[in-house]
Amino acid sequence: MERGDGLGGRAIIIYGSIGSGKTLTCLRLAEKLRKQGLKVLGLISPRVYEDDSLIGYDLLRVSTGERIPLCRVPEKAEESWLRYGRLHYAFSPKAFNWGNQVLMEEAEELDRGAVIFVDEFGRLEARGLGLYGGAMKVAESLQRGGAAIYSCRDDLAERVEELLSGRAGSISRHRAGDLEGILRDLGLTP
């Protein structure tokens, strides 16, 4: 994997609507990158189901497999969890603290042989909340090289690109599911 145009590392934005496969794309991509010998870092947020019903999302630390609850539907959330306006879920402050710490620590490891995931940059992050601090640290660390994979909904792709602009040597957007295109943009064989 090369450093992009020499100004910094590569940034990939995986975008799509709710349920389009952004997180699944990240999980599959992480496995392929690991098999190619790259250091795979960051956070991926898989769905959590109970009796076939979606009840929330977890944060999965890609490098270790450690997993903690990020958000749940209100009836499954703890009393102390945060609720934001009309958002469907209640969020764990502990998960935000832990997730930001993971991203900040692992951003320090970002170099030519590493790829870091930020799944997903959502409405809270767009307002400077949630995992925004960690997502920003990852963007700033791209100046050393490596690659960052951000996932977001369609309507936030431009916001993520603004965050990465001037920090990444190259930025490309891919729809969820485009593993071959993403690997090509990373300079790797699909």
Image (tube, rainbow, N blue to C red):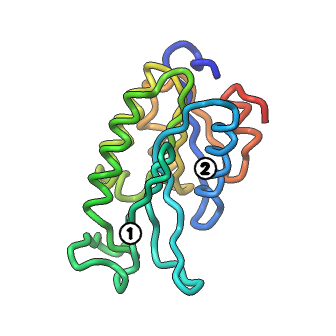
- Which residue occupies the foreground of this view, 98 or 84? 98
- Between the residue at mark 1 and the residue at mark 2, the CA separation in whole angstroms equals 19 Å
Residue 118 appears anywhere in the view: no
Figure check: 98 above or below 166: below
Q: Which mark is residue 71?
A: 1
Percent x, y of residue 110: 46, 27
Q: Quadrant of the N terminus?
A: top right
Residue under pointer 2: 26
Q: Residues within 10 Å of mark 1 (few under 14, many from 20)?
A: many
Residue positioned most to the left: 80
Figure check: 57 above or below 107: below
Figure check: 41 above or below 59: above
In the displayed structure image, the side of residue 43 where residue 11 appears, left or right: right
| Amino acid type, residue under disc 2 in the picture | Cys
Percent x, y of residue 184: 74, 31
Residue 65 appears anywhere in the view: yes
Percent x, y of residue 107: 40, 32
Who's the residue at 44% across and 37% down the image?
162
Residue positioned most to the top: 6
In the displayed structure image, the side of residue 92 where residue 157 appears, left or right: right
